[in-house]
Image (cartoon, helix red, strand yellow):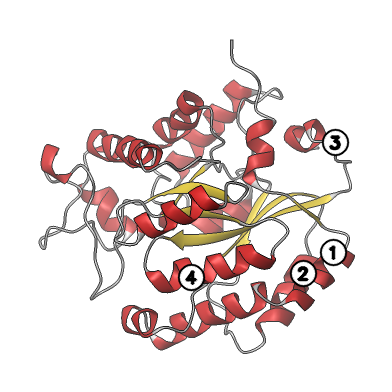
Amino acid sequence: MNPFLARLGFQPDDRVIILHADDLGMCHAVNAAFMDIAAVAPVASGSVMIPCPWVSELAAFAKAQPKVDIGVHITLTSEWRGYRWRPLSAHTSRGTLLDAQGYLWADVDSLHAHMDPAEAIAEMQAQVEYALNLGFDITHIDTHMGAVAHPGLVQAYVELGLTYGIPVMIPRPTEENIRRYDISPQTMSAIKKLLDQFGQDSPMPIIDRVTDLYDAPGATRREQYQNLIESLPPGLTHLLYHPACPFPEIKAITATDRWTSRVADWEVFTDPAFWDWLARSGVHLIGYRDLREALPQRT
């Protein structure tokens, strides 16, 4: 059984889920969608892209809603063609995190091929520090596009959580999770080494599975989420989604198949009928704040 679930009082057969909104702070349409969800969800959890332009709006919301889970979505890539962002540390680096236009690399492969890991690690810490300076009560740390899944970054990623006493989203190294993040053998070896060092009394929670519907069409979104949740086995699942209100900006930023699925996510997770169904489903809903409170006390 997942030891952190045992610490929280769950049983071996319990299915425990974190419903997690990714890409907060990316734009106003995403922030507005999450605010709508937080108004109806019994637990609202998500993570913020600190280098993005709309972070201040989310920081103000987080201060007004202190029970909402907000983590740092470590952002080392900038994937949209006409809407880009730069690293916080660009002025102090040698530029290995930057593409020819001066933005973060558009994809993970390009990032890993060009980066100096030391510069990536400095950027990761800068994002956490800036989030704290903005007043976020950081409940966890995770990673945009799985960019920290690199042998030169994994340990530093986990050490961020250990340093600040914050849970880090670490997927258990199963075949399913390896496919989800396209994890290389070298990175997998680094993750397994860390987990072996932690042992059963891990100072960090381990996520049993990470799943999403990012590439699924949005037409029957609620049914898709219900089917996915019903199929979950026991353990701790991080189910990520990408909500956005149907504002002009999200339509301009993303391709049609992307913005429509994001709007469909917003529609599902603001629907009271979905939350009523979830309450009857037998699944236990928690947030990263619960995991943060279960971290071993450091002396």
**In front: label 1 or label 4:** 4
Residue at label 1? 279
Residue at 46% across, 66% down:
31
Residue at label 4? 32
**Tags 1 and 2 in contact by the CB under 8 Å rule?**
yes
- Inspect the image, locate mark 3, and give the three-letter code of the amino acid beneath it: Gly
Residue at label 2? 275
Residue 181 is situated, as x and y percent measured from the top left of the image, at 49, 55
Dot placed on the residue nearer the N-terminal end, 2 or 4:
4
Relative to 215, 256 lies left or right: left
Q: Can residue 94 be seen by looking at this rendering? A: no
Dot placed on the residue nearer the N-terminal end, 4 or 3:
3
Looking at the rendered structure, the secondary structure element under dot 3 is loop
Looking at the rendered structure, the secondary structure element under dot 2 is helix
Depth check: 57 or 18 in front? 57
**In front: label 1 or label 3:** 1
Residue 9 shows which numbered tag? 3
**In front: label 2 or label 4:** 4
Looking at the rendered structure, the secondary structure element under dot 4 is helix
Residue 141 is situated, as x and y percent measured from the top left of the image, at 49, 42
User: Around disc 2, counting alpha carbons within 10 Å, would you say few (fewer than 14), some (14 to 19), or many (20 or more)?
Assistant: some
Give the Cα distance between marks 2 and 4. 19 Å
Relative to 23, 42 lies left or right: right
Up the image or down, 40 lies above or below 6; here it is below
**Tags 1 and 3 in contact by the CB under 8 Å rule?**
no
